Image: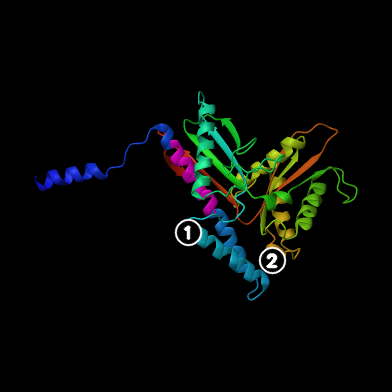
Amino acid sequence: MTKKAAKKKASKKVSPKKLDSKQQTMESLVELIRITSTVVPDDVFKAITTAAKNEEKNTIADYAMGIIKTNIDLAKYKSQPLCQDTGTVIFYIYHPPSFHQTPFKELIKKSVTLATKKGYLRQNSVNSLTGENAGTNLGEGHPSIHFYEHKGSEVEVKLVLKGGGCENVSAQYSLPDTTLGAGRDLEGVRKVILDSVHKAQGKGCGPGALGVCIGGDRADSSYFAKKQLLRKLDDKNSHKDLDKLEKEIVETCNKLGIGPMGFGGKTTLLSCKITSANRVPASFFVSISYMCWAFRRQGIVMNKNFAIKKWLY
């Protein structure tokens, strides 16, 4: 056998087996879960690094930020979850017309089970009535999957892993709130957001990030607040007044002295993102979705074969 023929034969032996569309989709989804669980997005890493530099040296806050940074490095290096609570698994899928949602949803569920088996997700999902844990992260309402049709020709999948600790300190207010002197205006909104951060203290694994919705009904208000966590931390709100309020909230909260993990310091919040939704005259809800420093949010654009074409964060 000539050297050329041997090389050709060897290349055939090591060439990867072509995946069918279902296998390729699952491979992409499992990789999305792995990266989301183990690597903080670039915008979050930048914000945490900047915050760490702002803390006074040799303080508890400085020590806490150091531990957070070490945790981030180790999780990425070992490809292990950033936190033992990998949280509620929330998918947002943006797809072109004529896209078949049902089979894609089933592939998401299979991918979640496989990612759990591989250790990228903890066995966190339990039956609320019986306490039973199937060990698959599958059950009624979990994972949480949302589909949206868009004008693009490609499929985009965004994923948020929302920890239970930060979810516990998320809040919803109904204005007016007489105890806080908060009326039905942006000043009232500012007061309740600050109150939610003050009440959270270090319980939400700060420094945290906020997603806020002004208005909507009880359910949609919370839903839109959580969707604000899909925004990049360094973006700018297109609404002038909300952009100003976002900046004011972060600046004010970072002067409260709560600091990382509630140990005191200059970094209580990394960001605040605010949106609004129409409401009926009788109601004025303000919903605040709190996200911990382990800001697990990532997204991919898939090509026509459902391989990963681009990372979104």
Question: Can you identify the residue that label 1 sits on?
Answer: 78
Q: Is residue 153 left or right of residue 202?
A: left
Coordinates of residue 209 in the picture (x, y in percent)? 66, 53
Q: Is residue 187 above or below residue 47?
A: above
Coordinates of residue 257 in the picture (x, y in percent)? 74, 66
Please tell me which residue lies in front, 131 or 52: 131
Residue range corresponding to the magenta coloring:
25-41
**Secondary-structure class at tag 1:** helix
- Mark 1 and mark 2 in contact (Cβ < 8 Å)? no
Count of marks, rendered view: 2
Q: Is residue 238 visible?
A: no
Quadrant containing the N terminus is: top left
Task: Kindly give the residue lying farthest to the top in the view shown.
Answer: 98
Q: Residue 264 is drawn in which quadrant?
A: bottom right
Residue ID at (55%, 58%): 45
Coordinates of residue 230 in the picture (x, y in percent)? 60, 44
**Secondary-structure class at tag 2:** loop
Question: Can you identify the residue that label 2 sits on?
Answer: 266
Q: Earlier in the sequence, mark 2 or mark 1?
A: 1
Q: Is residue 186 above or below residue 150?
A: below
